[in-house]
Image (cartoon, rainbow, N blue to C red):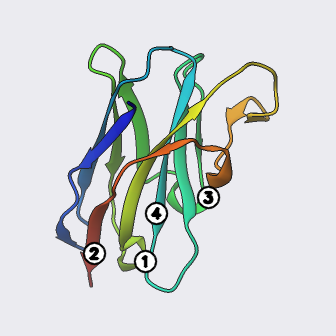
């Protein structure tokens, strides 16, 4: 059984930093992407960042470029999202998700992993990030 467990969410002041972790287990292939998504109250789920386990490519939504960094520790099957210069609009529940990669270019755009939620197969329970002004 595939399990994704997020941690690291917290209450932080604007301008602060947090590091989220996503620990994955139960997936027997190395062919997958891990994505971070977020959902604020009353808003649709938004793709934040993703990383390909296959080639290490990363992708970010424009609003977090230069502030967030995704990385992975493959030995620990853990993906991190370092979030710096946090803003109140970053407040949301953050989810990590896993996309099973079966080959081809459909899951990439411009060589980068895609951030479309319906493409992802497994989801964690989420961790709350609250940024106060």
Distance from the alpha carbon under mark 4 to that under mark 1: 11 Å
Mark 3, residues whose alpha carbon is within 10 Å: few (<14), some, or many (≥20)? few
Q: Secondary structure at mark 3?
A: helix
Mark 1, residues whose alpha carbon is within 10 Å: few (<14), some, or many (≥20)? few
Q: Nearer the viewer, residue 2 or 63?
A: 2
Image quadrant of residue 114?
A: top right
Q: Which residue is mark 3?
A: 62
Upstream in sequence: badge 4 or badge 3: 4
Upstream in sequence: badge 2 or badge 3: 3
Upstream in sequence: badge 3 or badge 1: 3
Q: Which residue is mark 4?
A: 38
Distance from the alpha carbon under mark 3 to that under mark 1: 13 Å
Q: Which residue is mark 1?
A: 89
- Residue 47 drawn at (x, y percent): 57, 56
Q: Secondary structure at mark 1?
A: helix
Mark 1 and mark 2 in contact? Answer it, CB < 8 Å: yes
Q: Which residue is mark 2?
A: 131
For the image, the number of numbered tags is: 4
């Amino acid at each position: 059984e595939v399990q994704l467990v997020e941690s690291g969410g917290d209450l932080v002041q604007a301008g602060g930093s947090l590091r989220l972790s996503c620990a994955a287990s139960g997936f027997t292939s190395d062919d997958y992407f891990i994505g971070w998504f977020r959902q604020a109250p009353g808003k649709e789920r938004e793709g934040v960042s993703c990383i390909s386990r296959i080639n290490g490519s990363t992708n970010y939504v424009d609003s977090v470029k230069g502030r967030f960094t995704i990385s992975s520790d493959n030995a620990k099957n853990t993906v991190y999202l370092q979030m710096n210069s946090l803003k109140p609009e970053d407040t949301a529940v953050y989810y990590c998700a896993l996309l099973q990669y079966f080959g081809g270019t459909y899951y990439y755009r411009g060589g980068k992993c895609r951030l479309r939620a319906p493409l992802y197969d497994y989801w964690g329970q989420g961790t709350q990030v609250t940024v106060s002004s």
